[in-house]
Image (tube, coloured by chain):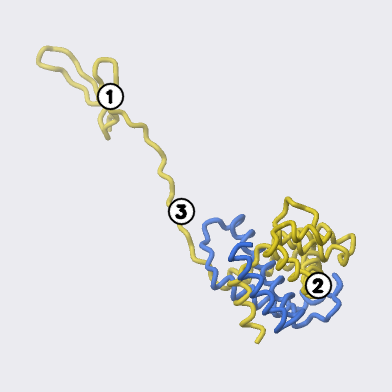
Chain colours: A blue, B yellow
Amino acid sequence: MSKNSLNKLIELDALIQKHGQKGVRLLHLFKLLKIKVIEMIEKEYPTILIDEETLNKICIQNAQRIIKRGKENLTEDDIKEIILKIMK
Amino acid sequence: MSKFRTGRRKDGRTYRYPVGPSRGRRIGKKVVGYKPKTPLQPPTLSRKMKESFVRGVIKSILSQTFFFKEINSTFTVADSIYTNWTLIKELYKNYEKEGFIGVVKSDVVQNAVSSIQTNIIWGVIKKYIPESYQTDSYNTILTITDKVTDEEIKYVEKFLK
């Protein structure tokens, strides 16, 4: 196993031990938003320089807003409702 | 104004040649030094992105209907990883000690083509994912879980305190 993946395993373990289900959800949602934003910018606005700091900040804020309103067992309709409330 | 200069030489021969920016010299029948005009390419300006721009992009992503399903499969994968973390961690440690054989022995991992991380996680959580979410969940592991970096994990942890 490479050093990078070992570091990642250690960090992920620490996150799960400390913050549980909420931590893993937030991490995955943050990464999903970040990937989608980068994909859209590269496709539709290729001349824009991607600033990682700004990107991280906005993605984590939006991910937190979604996680805060969510309950433990979420359905697709629950997620739709949460997002519609956030977008108002 | 005429585009040509005309006249008569001392020896009586007439001349006629174009005036204006040099487009080459004629030597006999051949024109030398001629460079065709090429249209100038406008310079591409790179702009630094602003916060308001990123917020707008996220808003348009969140408003896409299929995105609700992606978020749902992301949560399904995250919850399954959390629930089975002890087993996933154990398989990672086996891989560290014995290589791929240590992981294959567990009967959980079968696919040798994907990365070891994808293999381990998918092998463990697959049975907990509903049939209709299997493809999306596998893609979630490939694109998100596999690609998340340790710096990103540390960054997210700051917001959980």
Discs 3 and 1 share one subunit:
yes
Q: Distance between the residues labelled 3 and 2?
A: 49 Å
Residue designated by label 3: B44
Look at the picture and state if B10 lies above or below A31. above
Graded by Cα atoms within 10 Å as few (under 14), some (14 to 19) or many (20 or more), the crowding at tag 1 reads few
Q: What residue type is labelled 3?
A: Thr
Quadrant of the snapshot with the N terminus of chain A: bottom right
Residue B135 lies, in percent from the top left, at 82, 57
The residue depicted at 29 percent of the width and 22 percent of the height is B31
Quadrant location of the C terminus of chain A in the rendered image? bottom right
Q: Which mark is residue B32?
A: 1
Q: In which quarter of the image is residue B2?
A: top left
Identity of the residue drawn at 16% across and 13% down: B13
Q: How far apart are marks 1 and 2 (CA)?
A: 78 Å
Q: Earlier in the sequence, mark 1 or mark 2?
A: 1
Which badge, 3 or 2, comes first in the chain's sequence?
Answer: 3
Q: Where, by quadrant of the figure, is residue B81 drawn?
A: bottom right
Disc number placed over residue A74 in the picture, else none: none
Name the side, left or right, on which B73 lies relative to B151: right
* Disc on res. B84: 2
> Residue flagged by tag 2: what amino acid is it?
Asn
**Secondary structure state at the residue bearing disc 3:** loop
Check the image and report above or below for B96 versus A86: above
Q: Is residue B57 visible?
A: no
